[in-house]
Structure formats: C-alpha cells, structure tokens
Amino acid sequence: MGGVIIFDPNDPEVGFSVGDDQAANAYLDVENDALYITDLTNIIKWEGDAATNMQYTWRSAKLRSKRHINMGAGLVDAESYDSLVFKLYAEVDGVVTLIASLGVEDAEPFRLPGGYLSSTYQIEIISTDRIHSVAIGQSVFDLESEA
C-alpha cells in the first residue's frame, strides 16, 4: 500500500500529513514556485485547483497539560468546509482512546464529549480543505482568542 507523506522541514513541530494517493512522478517548477505530480494518467498542480485537492490525514504531536483535564470544545479555521473530519484522541487510563470523531461544517466552536479526564491529547484532521488553525480547550471561552 503506497501513499504520500508531506512534512515541513522548516517547522518540525507541525508534524506530517499522509495521503492515500500515489504520485508516480513529481516536478518542481522553481521559477514559478509550483509543484506538479502525476499518477501516470493526469498531471496535477499541487495546491492548484480546489477541485483536484487530494484527501490527507494530519495528526498533531501529543499535547500535554500539567494536570488531568477534559477538553470540552474545539474550533477549526479553514478556507472551506467541504470535507473536514475532526478527531480527538486522549490517553485515558494509559490507553489512547478516540474521544470524538465529527464532521466540521463551519468556523463556529463545537462541543466535545465529557465524562473523562486526561493530560495527553492528539488532534487528527482528515480533509481535502486547507486548514489555517485548529484549537481545543476546556470550554468555548478558552477558544475566544483563537476565533
């Protein structure tokens, strides 16, 4: 099973993204700052036409707090919300557990499930949309500075 892995060496804190599509060839046009890939049938400009965006999965680094808390709200700022799934993982009793998986349709804060406490979290985004930022907090009031 193949795929693509994308990472930013200038910002290793960001992590990396993966995709299911396979790029047979790639060409970097340095003069125009454009990347083109091909699947042996089509030539596609990377980050070109939004209609040709490939689905990706991005997972954050582990986010740690000094004490056990419940992340109760989330917010995703994106260019569009055509295909955006937000997932929250937390380490509960030593086991990484999927806490929430939901479709995000707009830039409004959303509630996350309660009933657990953790000091270690990870966020995962599955989408074709360009994301500007993702935030989680104990309440929607924690997200005010992110909006």
Image (tube, helix red, strand yellow):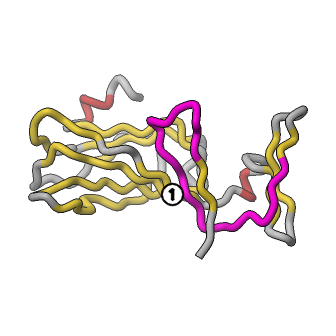
Image point 23% across, 39% down: which residue?
64
Quarter of the view holding residue 72: top left
Image point 51% across, 57% down: which residue?
57
The percent position of residue 135, horizontal first and vertical second, equals: 36, 37
Please tell me how crowded label 1 is: few (under 14), some (14-19), or many (20+) other residues with Cα within 10 Å.
some
The percent position of residue 12, horizontal first and vertical second, equals: 49, 36
Q: SS at mark 1?
A: strand
Is residue 144 shown left or right of residue 77? left
What amino acid is labelled 1 in the image?
Thr
The percent position of residue 62, horizontal first and vertical second, equals: 31, 45
- Judged from this view, the residue extending furthest toward the bottom is 1
Quadrant where the image shows the C terminus: top left
The percent position of residue 31, horizontal first and vertical second, equals: 90, 32
Image point 83% across, 44% down: which residue?
28
Q: Nearer the viewer, residue 71 or 61?
A: 61
Q: Nearer the viewer, residue 142 or 66?
A: 66
According to the picture, the residue beneath numbered tag 1 turns out to be: 57
Quarter of the view holding residue 95: bottom left
Compared with residue 91, is residue 109 higher up or lower down, i.e. above or below? above
Q: Nearer the viewer, residue 102 or 3?
A: 3
| Magenta residues (range) | 7-27
